Image: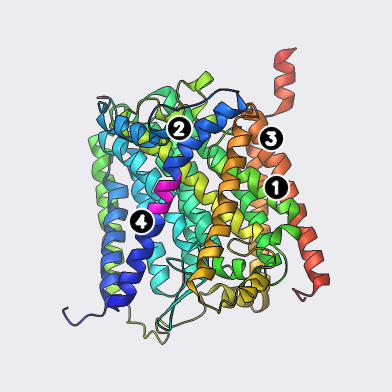
Amino acid sequence: MIALLIYKGIMCVAVFGISLGVAAYSTLWERKFAAFLQDRKGPNRAGWGGILQPLADGGKMFFKEEIIPNVSNRALFILGPSMFMVTALMTGAVIPWGKPLMINGVTYDLQITDINIGAIYILGVASVGVYGIMIGGWASNNKYSLLGAVRASSQMISYEIAMGISLIALIISAGGSLSVKDILESQDQGVANIVWQPLGFIIFFVCALAETNRAPFDMAECETELVGGFHTEYSAMKLGLFLFAEYINMFISSAIMAGFYFGGYNFPFANELYSALGLEQGSWLISLIGFGAYFTKIVLFICLFMWVRWTLPRFRYDQLMNLGWKGLLPLSLLNLAITIVIEYFRGNIQF
Amino acid sequence: MLGLTITQWLFGILSLMAIMFALMVVFTRNPVNSVLYLVLTFFCIAGHYLLLNAQFLAVVHIVVYAGAIMVLFLFIIMLMNLNPDTEPRKHIMTRLIAGVIGGVLLFVFVGALKGAEQLQLTQSGASQIGLIKNLGHVLFTEYLFPFEITSVLLLAALVGAIMIGKKDTNINVSRNS
């Protein structure tokens, strides 16, 4: 019992720390990446090549003056960013980060918890995530904040549907289990799910961009129209939490896409490599190599997110809604129908 | 701990929280707070589903009710910008009558509860029906007809809502000309 608690505790702290660390350095990487695309140098003063910039930013955020507008709803104003941060961190709990580790004959999964409805849990947490934006935007008592909040919520609800349906198609392809671990394990032998779900992946990626409020779908904080969107009235670390949670969301959705569609900690000829190196099941080196492979994929996805942001202009709001309801939703239904036909001939489903 | 198991403790705490939040939904003056308390009530009910070993139902409950329907409620209430100051004050007579009617209803409920016999629940907490595999199997074999009828009903409601919400193009044309 105690050993289980210690192990779960270590896993929680590790996932928490990795999420925060990756998010912090994503902010630096985003600025470097933008600078590269715009032929600039980017932040390069704090530390070697700007390596300490996230710490400087964080420190600045903490020491700025906290302003709570006196016409706002104080409790909800504070609740907004806190809730956004909490929901951003919750999804990491069901993601398996590597192959099970064997220590003294006991197998430890590199996953906080393997619930049998992990895929829907991810959708559930994503759908609750919008409350942080809505509460914060409304409690600011500012019409621009309110508009940003309303935009964010309608956008999230619209894109959640297409996301859910493309996820259903993926689950059919991956063998019918909703457990995240089973979906990743189904790609251990054979090919990654992207081969069977190319259209589903594109739909999922576009929806992930919209769900994380990233450009070109960042209507909620569109500064040319709405000042700062839902966080106009926020300052200091409460603003920092909103901005930071966006990067955590990006990290987690990259992890989900890399895991669901690109095999996660599996990679081509992995098992051949392990047997060539003479590693047996449960060795720490296998876990480490798997984790490294997964992490590389995640970083590539984060780069893709940034590439999209610094390349494409922002959508107009009606274009966004048209894309969601008239483009992605029918496309995801079509994808589901095609998947069912293909899987019937592959023999994965019977009628 | 008082001779109760962990499940019983959780049940008690969750029930207490659910009832408290449900009461807060009614008693808060601010409609936005009411909606947020209702969301908390849904979370407590999802916890009850988890205690009944129905994980799928619990998460779907959160996705559908807390994640979609209540967001739309919140959306509408925020846009209407209701607040306690502009709420019309009801006449004292109306309030008195409402109180009496509510009291009588409560009286009827308590009376009905008194006469009710206690049900003997045979199913224990270890039921497997709430797991997604069993639930899907039962829905698509034993209860296929009611399931399909429900989906047709929902579709009809959806089409009806769109018809009501749609702009009447004829009126616009005549107004423009």
On the image, numbered disc 1 is attached to which residue? Answer: A202
Tell me residue A196's x, y (percent): 75, 61
Spatial CA span between label 3 and label 1: 17 Å
Q: Nearer the viewer, residue B32 or A270?
A: A270
User: Which chain's residue wears label 4?
Assistant: B
Q: Is residue B83 left or right of residue A268?
A: left
Q: Is residue A21 magenta?
A: yes
Q: Secondary structure at mark 1?
A: helix
Distance between the Cα atoms at labels 3 and 2? 43 Å
Whether residues under marks 3 and 2 lie with C-beta atoms below 8 angstroms apart, the answer is: no
> In the structure shown, which secondary structural element does the residue marked by tag 4 occupy?
helix
Residue at mark 3: A322
The lab-note entry on whether marks 4 and 2 share a chain reads: no
User: Of circles 1 and 4, which is in front?
Assistant: 1
Given residues A26 and B52, the one toward you in this image is A26
| Label 2: element kind | helix
Name the residue beneath numbered marker 2.
Answer: A49
Query: What residue is pinned by disc 4?
Result: B41
Please give the count of numbered marks on the rendered protein.
Answer: 4
**In 3D space, how far apart are the residues under numbered discs 4 and 2 (Cα atoms)?**
50 Å
Q: Decide which of A84, B43 is in the foreground and name it.
A: A84
- Where A259 sits versus B177, above or below? below
Measured along the vertical axis of the image, is residue A275 above or below residue B106? below
* Residue type (three-letter) at the residue carrying disc 2: Gly
Is A136 left or right of A34, judged from the image as shown? left
Q: Position of residue A25 (x, y in %)?
A: 45, 41
Crowding at mark 2 (Cα within 10 Å: few <14, some 14-19, many 20+): few
Q: Is residue A195 magenta?
A: no
Quadrant in which residue B149 is drawn: bottom right
Q: Which residues are magenta?
A: A17-22
**From the viewer's perspective, is residue A126 above or below residue A271?**
above
